[in-house]
Image (spheres, rainbow, N blue to C red):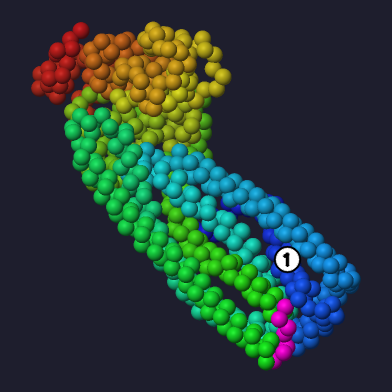
Amino acid sequence: MNSYYRILSYTKPYWKHIGLTFVFTILFAILNGVSVYLTIPLLDTLFQDPASNQNISQTSSITSSSSFLPDWIISIKDDIVNTFNTYILTGDKIEILIKICSVILVAFLLKNFFSYMQSYFMAYVEFASMKDLRDDAYKHLHKLPIGYFKSERVGNLISRFTNDVNIVQSSISATFSNLIKEPLTIIVFLAITISISWRLSLFAFIIVPAASLIIAWIGNRLKKLTVVLQTKLAEITSILQETISGVKIVKAFGMEEFENERFKRETKNYFKMVLRTVRTRNLSSPITEILSIIIGVVIIYYGGILVLVDKSLNASQFLGFLFAIFQMMPPIKELGSVNNRIQEASAAADRIFEIIDTEPHIKNAPDAVTLNEFKEDIVFDNVSFKYSDGEVNVLDNVSFTVKRGEIIALVGPSGGGKSTLADLIPRFYDPTDGSILIDGINLKHLTVESLRSKMGIVTQETFLFNTTVAENIAYGLTDYPMEKIIEAAKTANAHNFISEMPQGYETVIGERGVKLSGGQRQRLTIARALLKDPSIMIFDEATSALDNESEILVQEAIERLMLNRTTFVIAHRLSTIRNATNILVLDRGRIIQRGTHEELIAEEKGLYKKLFEMQFRDNND
């Protein structure tokens, strides 16, 4: 239940709306009771002599005096009855009938008005609090490190923000509507039944504790099933997301049938879990109803004895009692499902709070300072790194210094640690051992926001948003002049193809830039980096997946972007490496060679010369 209490904490900012919900719920419950209680004088008016109307208050007083209610409650009740008799039950039958019908009409109109207002304010609390929960989870998601997203499936995360939040949302109304409205309704009608006959009322509720135990068991069972159900739904979402994202690969390898079978297996497992959950959930409703019917049959029998034999009730009071009892059955039945919904919501909330409770290990230190300007150098001091689930260091005692304005090329076989080294600079990860310093300050002592604001990153896998070209180039910048956007696009060799698009810079490029070629997408990301004007640039194999023509255009844009900037580049083009101030050759996480192109190519048995002969000789400029 701790998770559910945390859910309720999101409703605190809306306490005024909750208060109004509570007020309107009370008024609804009272008017609901009044509308039913009025059936007693209505029946007396229709089916008894006028003189018998005078006996209603006397009979009620006799019944009340023999009950266990305190005298002050009996006094209030008698005053209300006497007042009602004075103003309503006076005159001939037609006049009394008109008055009673008028009061019933007003009571029902007000009851429904209060019900509408209660529902409106409850809906406000429900949707507003879930908006806040989604916002908090989404905000925290951006604080989590890159490693978190590598260990979590995208579909699973999306499922938590959609399906799980929807389940939690429905439980809010169950708490503040059903747990307030239904108990109040029960209390009002219970008061009515007790005022008519306390013995009959007591007889009606002897089986409630047993029903509560059965309902609680069903609720606990539902919570366990909901956890499994949501996990299965997340699996389906993940497969759907992966298949849509990789549709070209699926078709290229002719794997449609394989994916169909995989999807069918998951939907079949989900279907089985849904049936088990539905069977369990629906079990509480008939059980509650059966118990209610048992109570009702016993009441009818015992009440009939009181009317026919004991003579302590008249027929209209007994019918009024039955109306009140059966008005209590729906809220009792609804309360039987509340516990189930709360248990389901608690299970769903656990999955949401699992995101919020994940502590980001890449965060600002308490004494973190702002990096206003990069002035001197970046130093790797005996840096080692291994992933949380790894046993071997990806980087091992790496040390080097980069002066401002230098170009550092990272070269080596796949798996040597080049991309990992580049990821440490913007603090996507922190070193396991050693330290990285910028202008003599450990990166851990700088605010993450100020550090990354000085960096631009262009990778092999470009990412663009499903919005306009201009908005993609100016991503993160508001009210940016179009002239600057066009200037950045021209520098990135992107202006010409943008101008040929249907709406130019206002053309929407589709999800992940699907309407563009690989070279066009890459040039847009370079334009985006140019507009940011970073002091430090990181290129991670930015041209490796391009054709020759696109590669030349992108390479020209990269060379412009590198001007007067400190640059780290993992590249396949010889020209970039030839222009590097220093080349670091990494193998199995260690720097095994360093120097300029000319120095390294002169080492006959060095790894660099071997890589050069294998990869670069055909690209000789």
Res. 94 image quadrant? bottom right
Q: Is residue 539 left or right of residue 324?
A: left
x and y, in percent, of residue 239 in the image: 30, 42
Q: Give above or below for 244 relative to 322.
A: above
Residue 538 magenta: no
Q: Give above or below for 413 relative to 228.
A: above
Q: Which portion, as a residue range, is magenta? A: 310-316
Q: Residue at x 55, y 44 (%)?
A: 131
Q: Is residue 65 left or right of residue 121?
A: right
From the viewer's side, name the closer residue of 277 and 34: 34
Res. 263 image quadrant? top left
x and y, in percent, of residue 238 in the image: 33, 43
Res. 225 image quadrant? bottom left
x and y, in percent, of residue 352 in the image: 45, 50
Q: Kindly tell me whether residue 365 is visible in this rendering.
A: no
Q: Is residue 170 left or right of residue 559?
A: right
**Secondary structure under badge 1?**
helix
x and y, in percent, of residue 302 in the image: 62, 86
Q: Residue at x 23, y 45 (%)?
A: 261
Circle 1 crowding by C-alpha within 10 Å: few under 14, some 14–19, many from 20? some
The residue that label 1 is drawn on is 35
From the viewer's side, name the closer residue of 107 and 262: 107
Residue 315 magenta: yes
Q: Kindly tell me whether residue 481 is visible in this rendering.
A: yes
Q: Quadrant for the C terminus, please.
A: top left
Q: Residue at x 44, y 64 (%)?
A: 282
Q: Amino acid at mark 1?
A: Ser
From the viewer's side, name the closer residue of 246 and 262: 262
- Residue sitting at the far bottom: 309
Q: Residue at x 31, y 50 (%)?
A: 267
